[in-house]
Image: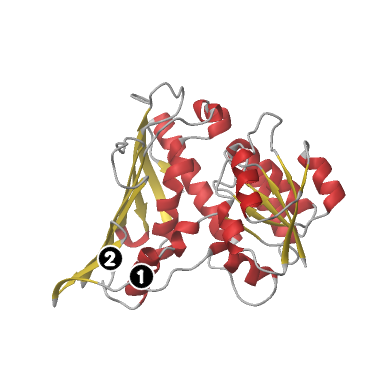
Amino acid sequence: MLKICVIGSSGHFRYALEGLDEECSITGIAPGVPEEDLSKLEKAISEMNIKPKKYNNWWEMLEKEKPDILVINTVFSLNGKILLEALERKIHAFVEKPIATTFEDLEKIRSVYQKVRNEVFFTAMFGIRYRPHFLTAKKLVSEGAVGEIRLVNTQKSYKLGQRPDFYKKRETYGGTIPWVGIHAIDWIHWITGKKFLSVYATHSRLHNSGHGELETTALCHFTLENEVFASLSIDYLRPQGAPTHDDDRMRIVGTRGIVEVINERVFLTDEKGHREVPLVEKGQIFEDFLREIRGQGKCMVTPEDSILTTEIALKARLSADTGQIVLI
Protein backbone atom coordinates (compact mmCIF):
# COMPACT_ATOMS: atom_id res chain seq x y z
CA MET A 1 0.00 0.00 0.00
CA LEU A 2 1.39 3.40 -1.01
CA LYS A 3 0.92 6.10 1.63
CA ILE A 4 0.09 9.50 0.14
CA CYS A 5 0.06 12.90 1.84
CA VAL A 6 -1.27 16.09 0.24
CA ILE A 7 0.08 19.58 0.95
CA GLY A 8 -2.18 22.43 -0.09
CA SER A 9 -5.33 22.90 -2.10
CA SER A 10 -4.20 25.67 -4.46
CA GLY A 11 -3.31 23.58 -7.49
CA HIS A 12 -4.44 20.57 -9.48
CA PHE A 13 -4.68 17.99 -6.68
CA ARG A 14 -7.64 16.41 -8.51
CA TYR A 15 -5.20 14.76 -10.93
CA ALA A 16 -4.03 12.66 -7.97
CA LEU A 17 -7.54 11.91 -6.75
CA GLU A 18 -8.63 10.81 -10.22
CA GLY A 19 -5.63 8.49 -10.54
CA LEU A 20 -5.89 6.71 -7.18
CA ASP A 21 -6.29 2.94 -7.11
CA GLU A 22 -6.89 0.31 -4.44
CA GLU A 23 -3.17 0.16 -3.64
CA CYS A 24 -3.07 3.85 -2.61
CA SER A 25 -4.10 5.45 0.67
CA ILE A 26 -4.25 9.17 1.45
CA THR A 27 -3.23 9.27 5.11
CA GLY A 28 -2.70 12.98 5.73
CA ILE A 29 -3.42 16.46 4.45
CA ALA A 30 -2.00 19.83 5.51
CA PRO A 31 -1.91 23.43 4.30
CA GLY A 32 1.29 24.82 2.85
CA VAL A 33 0.82 28.01 4.85
CA PRO A 34 -1.42 28.47 7.91
CA GLU A 35 -3.93 30.66 6.08
CA GLU A 36 -4.38 28.33 3.09
CA ASP A 37 -7.98 27.28 2.48
CA LEU A 38 -8.23 23.48 2.24
CA SER A 39 -12.00 23.39 1.75
CA LYS A 40 -11.84 22.30 -1.92
CA LEU A 41 -9.52 19.42 -1.07
CA GLU A 42 -11.54 18.41 1.98
CA LYS A 43 -14.80 18.43 0.03
CA ALA A 44 -13.31 16.37 -2.81
CA ILE A 45 -11.84 13.66 -0.57
CA SER A 46 -14.97 13.56 1.57
CA GLU A 47 -17.05 12.81 -1.53
CA MET A 48 -14.70 9.88 -2.17
CA ASN A 49 -15.17 8.67 1.41
CA ILE A 50 -11.48 9.25 2.15
CA LYS A 51 -10.75 10.25 5.74
CA PRO A 52 -7.12 11.27 6.19
CA LYS A 53 -5.72 12.94 9.29
CA LYS A 54 -5.59 16.72 9.00
CA TYR A 55 -2.45 18.49 10.17
CA ASN A 56 -1.89 22.19 10.69
CA ASN A 57 1.79 21.85 9.86
CA TRP A 58 3.04 19.92 6.81
CA TRP A 59 6.45 19.34 8.37
CA GLU A 60 4.81 17.55 11.30
CA MET A 61 2.75 15.52 8.84
CA LEU A 62 5.89 14.28 7.06
CA GLU A 63 7.51 13.36 10.36
CA LYS A 64 4.52 11.36 11.58
CA GLU A 65 3.07 9.89 8.39
CA LYS A 66 6.32 9.13 6.54
CA PRO A 67 4.54 8.99 3.17
CA ASP A 68 5.74 7.21 0.04
CA ILE A 69 4.26 9.95 -2.17
CA LEU A 70 3.78 13.66 -1.58
CA VAL A 71 1.25 15.65 -3.62
CA ILE A 72 2.45 19.28 -3.51
CA ASN A 73 0.09 22.06 -4.60
CA THR A 74 0.16 24.99 -2.24
CA VAL A 75 1.04 28.69 -2.71
CA PHE A 76 3.15 28.51 -5.86
CA SER A 77 6.31 30.05 -4.38
CA LEU A 78 6.45 27.27 -1.77
CA ASN A 79 6.04 24.28 -4.09
CA GLY A 80 9.73 24.20 -4.99
CA LYS A 81 10.88 24.49 -1.38
CA ILE A 82 8.62 21.62 -0.34
CA LEU A 83 9.77 19.56 -3.34
CA LEU A 84 13.34 20.00 -2.11
CA GLU A 85 12.31 18.63 1.27
CA ALA A 86 10.63 15.66 -0.40
CA LEU A 87 13.71 14.88 -2.49
CA GLU A 88 16.00 15.11 0.52
CA ARG A 89 13.70 12.71 2.41
CA LYS A 90 13.55 10.49 -0.70
CA ILE A 91 9.77 10.83 -1.00
CA HIS A 92 8.32 10.56 -4.52
CA ALA A 93 6.64 13.85 -5.43
CA PHE A 94 3.75 14.85 -7.67
CA VAL A 95 4.18 18.61 -7.72
CA GLU A 96 2.31 21.54 -9.19
CA LYS A 97 4.02 23.48 -11.94
CA PRO A 98 6.12 25.52 -12.06
CA ILE A 99 8.26 23.34 -9.79
CA ALA A 100 10.04 26.54 -8.69
CA THR A 101 9.34 30.26 -9.02
CA THR A 102 12.99 31.36 -8.62
CA PHE A 103 16.20 30.35 -10.36
CA GLU A 104 17.77 29.75 -6.96
CA ASP A 105 15.18 27.16 -5.94
CA LEU A 106 15.31 25.53 -9.36
CA GLU A 107 19.09 25.08 -9.19
CA LYS A 108 18.79 23.53 -5.73
CA ILE A 109 16.19 21.10 -7.07
CA ARG A 110 18.40 20.21 -10.03
CA SER A 111 21.39 19.62 -7.75
CA VAL A 112 19.58 17.50 -5.16
CA TYR A 113 17.77 15.46 -7.80
CA GLN A 114 21.08 14.50 -9.43
CA LYS A 115 22.13 12.94 -6.11
CA VAL A 116 18.93 10.95 -5.51
CA ARG A 117 17.71 10.27 -9.05
CA ASN A 118 18.16 6.51 -8.70
CA GLU A 119 16.05 6.41 -5.54
CA VAL A 120 13.24 8.90 -6.00
CA PHE A 121 11.01 10.17 -8.81
CA PHE A 122 9.03 13.37 -9.27
CA THR A 123 6.95 14.98 -11.96
CA ALA A 124 5.27 18.31 -12.56
CA MET A 125 1.50 18.36 -13.09
CA PHE A 126 1.51 18.67 -16.88
CA GLY A 127 -1.81 16.87 -17.11
CA ILE A 128 -2.88 18.68 -20.27
CA ARG A 129 -0.46 16.48 -22.23
CA TYR A 130 -2.77 13.55 -21.50
CA ARG A 131 -5.89 15.08 -23.07
CA PRO A 132 -6.98 13.30 -26.28
CA HIS A 133 -6.42 16.28 -28.58
CA PHE A 134 -2.80 16.81 -27.52
CA LEU A 135 -2.00 13.11 -27.55
CA THR A 136 -3.44 13.00 -31.08
CA ALA A 137 -1.33 15.96 -32.21
CA LYS A 138 1.77 14.31 -30.74
CA LYS A 139 0.95 11.04 -32.54
CA LEU A 140 0.47 12.79 -35.89
CA VAL A 141 3.76 14.66 -35.63
CA SER A 142 5.62 11.54 -34.49
CA GLU A 143 4.25 9.65 -37.51
CA GLY A 144 5.59 12.33 -39.86
CA ALA A 145 2.28 13.95 -40.81
CA VAL A 146 3.76 17.46 -40.98
CA GLY A 147 7.21 16.49 -42.22
CA GLU A 148 9.99 18.64 -40.77
CA ILE A 149 8.63 21.11 -38.21
CA ARG A 150 9.36 24.74 -39.08
CA LEU A 151 6.93 26.84 -37.01
CA VAL A 152 4.74 26.42 -33.91
CA ASN A 153 2.00 28.72 -32.56
CA THR A 154 0.41 28.15 -29.15
CA GLN A 155 -2.30 29.84 -27.11
CA LYS A 156 -3.37 29.79 -23.45
CA SER A 157 -6.48 31.83 -22.64
CA TYR A 158 -8.17 31.69 -19.20
CA LYS A 159 -11.05 33.30 -17.40
CA LEU A 160 -9.65 35.40 -14.56
CA GLY A 161 -12.54 35.38 -12.12
CA GLN A 162 -11.55 36.14 -8.53
CA ARG A 163 -8.22 34.60 -7.58
CA PRO A 164 -6.80 34.02 -4.07
CA ASP A 165 -4.72 36.83 -2.58
CA PHE A 166 -1.39 35.09 -3.25
CA TYR A 167 -1.97 35.57 -6.99
CA LYS A 168 -1.71 39.32 -6.43
CA LYS A 169 2.00 39.32 -5.53
CA ARG A 170 4.83 38.21 -7.78
CA GLU A 171 6.68 36.88 -4.73
CA THR A 172 3.99 34.29 -4.01
CA TYR A 173 2.40 33.88 -7.47
CA GLY A 174 5.54 33.66 -9.58
CA GLY A 175 4.08 35.27 -12.68
CA THR A 176 1.60 34.41 -15.40
CA ILE A 177 4.20 33.08 -17.84
CA PRO A 178 5.43 30.43 -15.33
CA TRP A 179 1.93 29.60 -14.08
CA VAL A 180 -0.16 29.63 -17.27
CA GLY A 181 2.32 29.76 -20.14
CA ILE A 182 4.45 26.86 -18.92
CA HIS A 183 1.84 24.40 -20.23
CA ALA A 184 2.39 25.55 -23.81
CA ILE A 185 6.16 25.59 -23.30
CA ASP A 186 5.77 21.94 -22.32
CA TRP A 187 3.75 21.17 -25.47
CA ILE A 188 6.40 22.77 -27.67
CA HIS A 189 9.20 20.87 -25.95
CA TRP A 190 7.32 17.55 -25.93
CA ILE A 191 5.89 17.59 -29.46
CA THR A 192 8.83 19.13 -31.36
CA GLY A 193 11.69 17.55 -29.43
CA LYS A 194 13.74 20.61 -30.36
CA LYS A 195 16.22 22.40 -28.12
CA PHE A 196 15.24 25.93 -27.01
CA LEU A 197 17.93 28.53 -27.74
CA SER A 198 16.49 31.91 -26.78
CA VAL A 199 13.33 33.82 -25.88
CA TYR A 200 12.00 37.35 -26.18
CA ALA A 201 8.85 38.01 -24.16
CA THR A 202 6.57 40.82 -23.04
CA HIS A 203 3.79 40.96 -20.43
CA SER A 204 1.32 43.45 -18.97
CA ARG A 205 -0.64 43.88 -15.71
CA LEU A 206 -3.21 46.23 -17.20
CA HIS A 207 -6.91 45.41 -16.69
CA ASN A 208 -6.30 42.69 -14.11
CA SER A 209 -9.48 43.51 -12.12
CA GLY A 210 -7.69 44.45 -8.91
CA HIS A 211 -5.29 41.50 -8.88
CA GLY A 212 -2.24 43.56 -7.99
CA GLU A 213 0.91 42.34 -9.71
CA LEU A 214 -0.74 39.59 -11.77
CA GLU A 215 -0.04 39.86 -15.50
CA THR A 216 -3.14 39.56 -17.67
CA THR A 217 -1.45 39.31 -21.06
CA ALA A 218 1.88 37.97 -22.31
CA LEU A 219 3.54 37.07 -25.58
CA CYS A 220 6.66 34.93 -26.05
CA HIS A 221 8.81 34.33 -29.11
CA PHE A 222 11.12 31.32 -28.85
CA THR A 223 13.96 30.42 -31.19
CA LEU A 224 14.61 26.68 -31.27
CA GLU A 225 17.41 24.76 -32.94
CA ASN A 226 17.51 24.46 -36.74
CA GLU A 227 15.79 27.86 -37.11
CA VAL A 228 12.45 26.61 -35.81
CA PHE A 229 10.36 29.40 -34.26
CA ALA A 230 7.59 29.08 -31.69
CA SER A 231 5.14 31.61 -30.32
CA LEU A 232 3.07 31.62 -27.14
CA SER A 233 0.08 33.90 -26.52
CA ILE A 234 -1.24 34.07 -22.93
CA ASP A 235 -4.19 35.95 -21.51
CA TYR A 236 -6.59 36.04 -18.56
CA LEU A 237 -9.19 37.89 -20.62
CA ARG A 238 -11.44 35.02 -21.69
CA PRO A 239 -14.98 36.37 -21.15
CA GLN A 240 -17.14 34.91 -18.40
CA GLY A 241 -19.72 34.05 -21.03
CA ALA A 242 -17.32 31.71 -22.85
CA PRO A 243 -18.41 28.04 -22.82
CA THR A 244 -15.21 26.79 -21.17
CA HIS A 245 -12.74 28.14 -18.60
CA ASP A 246 -9.79 27.77 -20.95
CA ASP A 247 -9.07 27.99 -24.64
CA ASP A 248 -5.95 25.99 -25.51
CA ARG A 249 -4.71 26.03 -29.09
CA MET A 250 -1.69 24.80 -30.98
CA ARG A 251 -0.62 24.99 -34.63
CA ILE A 252 2.33 22.97 -35.89
CA VAL A 253 3.58 23.91 -39.36
CA GLY A 254 5.88 21.56 -41.24
CA THR A 255 7.26 20.92 -44.69
CA ARG A 256 4.50 18.40 -45.53
CA GLY A 257 1.48 19.57 -43.57
CA ILE A 258 -0.11 21.52 -40.72
CA VAL A 259 -1.65 20.11 -37.55
CA GLU A 260 -4.03 22.35 -35.58
CA VAL A 261 -5.53 21.84 -32.12
CA ILE A 262 -8.59 24.00 -31.49
CA ASN A 263 -11.69 23.56 -29.33
CA GLU A 264 -10.39 20.13 -28.25
CA ARG A 265 -10.43 18.97 -31.87
CA VAL A 266 -7.52 18.18 -34.19
CA PHE A 267 -7.25 19.07 -37.86
CA LEU A 268 -4.68 18.04 -40.44
CA THR A 269 -4.02 19.92 -43.68
CA ASP A 270 -1.72 18.36 -46.28
CA GLU A 271 -1.62 17.51 -49.99
CA LYS A 272 -4.76 15.40 -49.51
CA GLY A 273 -6.76 18.37 -48.24
CA HIS A 274 -8.11 19.55 -44.88
CA ARG A 275 -9.80 17.16 -42.46
CA GLU A 276 -10.59 16.50 -38.82
CA VAL A 277 -8.63 13.64 -37.27
CA PRO A 278 -10.23 11.11 -34.86
CA LEU A 279 -8.92 11.50 -31.33
CA VAL A 280 -6.91 8.86 -29.51
CA GLU A 281 -7.92 7.73 -26.02
CA LYS A 282 -7.15 10.07 -23.12
CA GLY A 283 -4.46 9.33 -20.57
CA GLN A 284 -4.12 10.11 -16.86
CA ILE A 285 -0.95 11.67 -15.47
CA PHE A 286 -1.13 10.35 -11.88
CA GLU A 287 -1.75 6.81 -13.10
CA ASP A 288 1.34 7.26 -15.30
CA PHE A 289 3.28 8.58 -12.28
CA LEU A 290 2.27 5.53 -10.23
CA ARG A 291 3.40 3.16 -12.99
CA GLU A 292 6.83 4.76 -12.93
CA ILE A 293 7.42 4.50 -9.20
CA ARG A 294 6.11 0.92 -9.17
CA GLY A 295 8.51 -0.05 -11.93
CA GLN A 296 5.66 -0.88 -14.32
CA GLY A 297 6.49 1.64 -17.03
CA LYS A 298 7.85 5.08 -17.80
CA CYS A 299 6.01 8.29 -16.96
CA MET A 300 5.55 10.52 -20.00
CA VAL A 301 6.52 13.60 -17.93
CA THR A 302 10.01 13.16 -16.51
CA PRO A 303 11.88 15.11 -13.80
CA GLU A 304 14.15 16.38 -16.57
CA ASP A 305 11.11 17.70 -18.51
CA SER A 306 9.84 19.34 -15.33
CA ILE A 307 13.16 21.08 -14.65
CA LEU A 308 13.74 22.19 -18.25
CA THR A 309 10.30 23.66 -18.85
CA THR A 310 10.49 25.54 -15.56
CA GLU A 311 13.86 26.99 -16.53
CA ILE A 312 12.49 28.11 -19.91
CA ALA A 313 9.42 29.68 -18.28
CA LEU A 314 11.54 31.58 -15.74
CA LYS A 315 13.81 32.83 -18.52
CA ALA A 316 10.78 33.96 -20.52
CA ARG A 317 9.56 35.85 -17.44
CA LEU A 318 13.04 37.39 -17.08
CA SER A 319 12.91 38.51 -20.70
CA ALA A 320 9.51 40.13 -20.17
CA ASP A 321 10.73 41.85 -17.00
CA THR A 322 13.91 43.21 -18.60
CA GLY A 323 12.86 43.74 -22.22
CA GLN A 324 15.90 41.75 -23.36
CA ILE A 325 16.42 38.58 -25.38
CA VAL A 326 17.44 35.84 -22.93
CA LEU A 327 19.54 32.83 -23.94
CA ILE A 328 18.35 29.40 -22.83
Q: Secondary structure at mark 2?
A: strand
Label 1 environment density (alpha carbons within 10 Å; few <14, some 14–19, many ≥20): many
Asked which quadrant contains residue 221, the reply is: top left
Query: As displayed, is residue 140 above or below residue 120?
Result: below
Q: Mark 1 or mark 2, which has the lower sequence index?
A: 1
Q: Residue shown at 29%/36% (left/top)?
A: 239
Q: CA distance from mark 1 to mark 2?
A: 7 Å
Q: Picture coordinates of residue 150 (x, y %)? A: 27, 62
Label 2 environment density (alpha carbons within 10 Å; few <14, some 14–19, many ≥20): many
Q: Are marks 1 and 2 in contact (CB under 8 Å)?
A: yes
Query: As displayed, is residue 242 above or below residue 213?
Result: below
Q: Residue shown at 69%/41% (left/top)?
A: 81
Most foreground residue, 59 or 98: 59
* Disc ID at residue 266: 2
* Disc ID at residue 259: none
- Could one spot residue 270 in this view of the protein? yes
* Disc ID at residue 136: 1
Most foreground residue, 252 or 108: 252
Quarter of the picture containing the N terminus is bottom right
